[in-house]
Image (cartoon, rainbow, N blue to C red):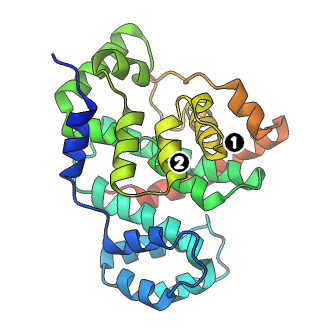
Amino acid sequence: MNKLTMNQVVKTIRGLPPLPEIVADLLSTMGEDDVDIDTLAEKLARDPALVATTLRLANSSFYGMSHRVSSVRESFAILGLKSMRTLVIAASVANGFIANHDLAGKIEKNWHHSISVAVCAKALARQLHQDQELAFTAGLLHDIGILVLAIYFPIQNQAALTHRAMHDCTLFQAEQTILGIDHAMAGQALAEYWKLPQEIQLAIGGHHAPDQVEHCTLVSLVHVADAIVHALDLAMEEAELVPPVSTAAWDRLGIGQETALRVFEETEQQLAEMCQILTIQ
């Protein structure tokens, strides 16, 4: 079997539909002070499925609302643009890229893992006074490349899975050996196509090698959250090994024992509800 090339992956990615208009609009508002919330709310309201998932997220204990939010405009008013951006991106990926494919087996487990890393990354960001919404989004999308390979290159992907089982290595290592590329590379290519923020692109592409990405705390944060989720076996996949943790990334974040224990507890408490909202039945 011939190995994959990034040209093959990029060509496939360019054949995918772009992100919904409302997601693209929300991403374009990053760093802007003067944003027309009414226009954004109106565009979001045109997609009932996206609205339904977004409101379920907004009303979850994850955001600790004092009363139920019943409309898109109210969500924007109470949660703010940054939180709404995160919610809409999460809902869009769940309803669009994920929902249009068979989630049985490996893909479903991977999506569960991605949600776990998102929850953990946000908890970690809260403890370390980093951007929680950015951390959640990066955590949710960090393994999106696994879905690209599994859905669009199933034969090659299965060969990598077989190699992993036979040689007791991580999926990342198996992909590099069998495919010649890995899911981090494929995921970063998709993030670039979707025009996601540069920090998120780097976090997706570098979450297995944070020491190779300079001056990006988000990469270290997602890398550590990924390792924590594997260590806690939150994806409930016995065959998957815990990836090696970069000492430099851990030290860069300055995580103490008390902080780590709080992150463990918070992640386990919030995970079930978030999975129920973002997993397509």
Residue 93, given in percent of the width and then of the height, sits at: 36, 58
Q: Quadrant of residue 43?
A: bottom left
- Classify 80 as above or below 98: below
Report whether residue 268 is seen: no
Q: Quadrant of residue 126?
A: bottom right
Badge number at residue 139 = 2
Type of the residue with mark 1: Phe
Q: Quadrant of residue 211?
A: top right
Relative horizontal placement of residue 128, taking residue 220 as reference (left or right): right
Distance of mark 1 from mark 2, alpha carbons? 15 Å
- Mark 1 closeness class: few <14, some 14–19, many ≥20 residues within 10 Å: some
Residue 65, given in percent of the width and then of the height, sits at: 64, 76
Q: Which residue is mark 1?
A: 264
Type of the residue with mark 2: Gly
Report whether residue 221 is seen: yes
Badge number at residue 37 = none
Q: Which residue occupies 83% across, 37% down?
A: 256
- Quadrant of the drawing holding the C terminus: bottom left
Which element type, helix, strand or loop, lies under badge 2? helix
Q: Which residue occupies 39% across, 50% down?
A: 191
- Quadrant of the drawing holding the N terminus: top left
